[in-house]
Image (spheres, grey):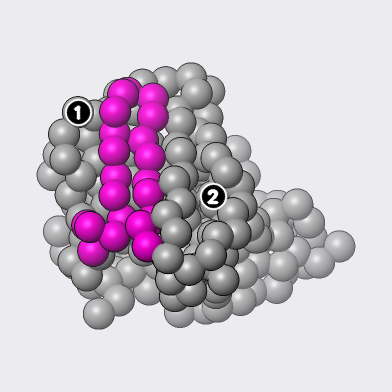
Amino acid sequence: GAVVSQHPSWVICKSGTSVKIECRSLDFQATTMFWYRQFPKQSLMLMATSNEGSKATYEQGVEKDKFLINHASLTLSTLTVTSAHPEDSSFYICSASGSKAYEQYFGPGTRLTVT
Amino acid sequence: DQQVKQNSPSLSVQEGRISILNCDYTNSMFDYFLWYKKYPAEGPTFLISISSIKDKNEDGRFTVFLNKSAKHLSLHIVPSQPGDSAVYFCAASETSGTYKYIFGTGTRLKVLA
């Protein structure tokens, strides 16, 4: 149980375009979903927290107009990187928590490369 | 300001021996802790958790110890197996509605056969 999927697993896009990443909880209802970013050989950095049906809460320093988060249902959250630039290239990981709020289950991650 | 620190970037252990991974934190409001295992280009896999009301939690080969006064936790893996080779992250959160975890920088464990 507690499986989280992400799609796509990797994506290459041109500078200036937008990319959407999906995060789905497959076998549980995710009350809260989280989006993280990881640079090579660094830790996971929390970008934002989203609850189903409400606006996401962004961490300090994360541009909400650049990283659009939609948590439309209890099993789906999306992250859209708008007007992507090469510095947005990174590994993006989502996680989800359900009835046990203290447990978070992570997706496999999405490697974004902006050329 | 790194609130959660894993001071050992890497650790090598012989198969069958004990692996001890350490984690220190600075925020005294943290009261829930998780350990994750991560392979390259994959998402973290949950291993074990501990809340501040306990000082030890055990699950199979994995045991987590918490020393609140020292703001220190450790993960013990006994016996270590080659398949345990991965990067291990500790994460800490306050218990305040939404659990927003702060992750350490990770320790790369290599278990030698």
Q: Give x and y (percent) for residue B85.
A: 70, 60
Residue B37: which disc?
none
The residue lying toward the viewer, choosing from B87 and B66, is B87
- Report the residue at 30% width, 76% height from top: B2
The residue lying toward the viewer, choosing from B70 and B83, is B83
Q: Give x and y (percent) for residue B83.
A: 75, 52
Location of mark 1 (residue): A53
Q: Is residue A26 visible?
A: yes
**Badge 1: residue crowd in 10 Å (few <14, some 14–19, many ≥20):** few
The residue lying toward the viewer, choosing from B104 and A86, is A86
Residue at disc 2, secondary structure = loop
On screen, residue A41 above or below B33: below
Which amino acid, by three-letter code, is at mark 2? Gly
- Report the residue at 46% width, 45% height from top: A21
Q: What segment is highlighted magenta in the picture?
A: A63-84
Q: Specify the subunit that label 2 lies on.
A: A
Q: Specify the subunit that label 1 lies on.
A: A
C-alpha distance separating marks 2 and 1: 23 Å
Answer whether residue A70 is magenta in the image: yes
Q: Give the quadrant of the C terminus of chain A.
A: bottom right
Q: Is residue B32 visible?
A: no
On screen, residue A103 above or below B15: above
Q: Give x and y (percent) for residue A15.
A: 48, 68
Location of mark 2 (residue): A109
